[in-house]
Image (cartoon, rainbow, N blue to C red):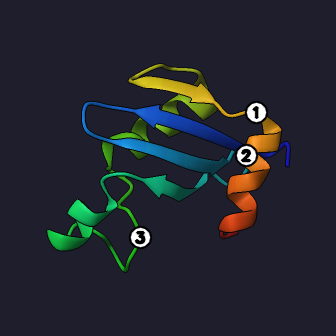
């Protein structure tokens, strides 16, 4: 659990919860308010959010390097576990 960080990201129109494995740098989008827009417009890559998504870039920058590019914060471990149980991180 200590190698996976859950980050909440709030951009202009996007609100998402993203899990990041800090060892392998793999990203799993657990919840995103923009997912339907991306699906309808064909932005999803094999059903997954692309790595250039603004929310993913902001979450990775915050979790790995501590840079703040949007309204981001770490989710406490208990709440993070709730999201991870609903959808496990692919390793």
Mark 2 lies on a secondary structure that is: helix
| Quadrant in the picture for residue 57 | top left
Q: Looking at the image, which residue is at 35% across and 60% down?
A: 50
Counting residues from the N terminus, which is met first, the one under dot 1 or under dot 3?
A: 3
x and y percent of residue 43 in the render? 22, 66
Q: Quadrant of the C terminus?
A: bottom right
Assess disc 1: are there few (<14), some (14-19) or many (≥20) residues with their C-alpha within 10 Å of its C-alpha: few
Q: Looking at the image, which residue is at 72% across and 59% down?
A: 84
Give the label on residue 48, or none: 3
Circle 2 is placed at which residue position?
80
Counting residues from the N terminus, which is met first, the one under dot 2 or under dot 3?
A: 3
Which residue occupies the foreground of this view, 51 or 14? 14
Assess disc 2: are there few (<14), some (14-19) or many (≥20) residues with their C-alpha within 10 Å of its C-alpha: many
Visible residue check, residue 71:
yes
**Real-space CA distance between mark 1 and mark 2, rounded to the nearest whole angstrom:** 6 Å
Assess disc 3: are there few (<14), some (14-19) or many (≥20) residues with their C-alpha within 10 Å of its C-alpha: few
Circle 1 is placed at which residue position?
76
């Amino acid at each position: 659990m200590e190698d996976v960080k859950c980050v909440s990201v709030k951009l202009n129109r996007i609100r998402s919860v993203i899990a990041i494995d800090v060892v392998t740098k793999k990203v799993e989008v657990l919840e995103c308010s923009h997912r339907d827009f991306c699906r309808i417009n064909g932005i999803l890559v094999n059903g997954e959010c692309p790595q250039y998504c603004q929310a993913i870039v902001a979450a990775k920058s915050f979790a790995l390097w501590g840079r703040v590019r949007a309204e981001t914060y770490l989710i406490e471990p208990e709440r993070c576990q709730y999201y991870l149980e609903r959808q496990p991180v692919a390793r």
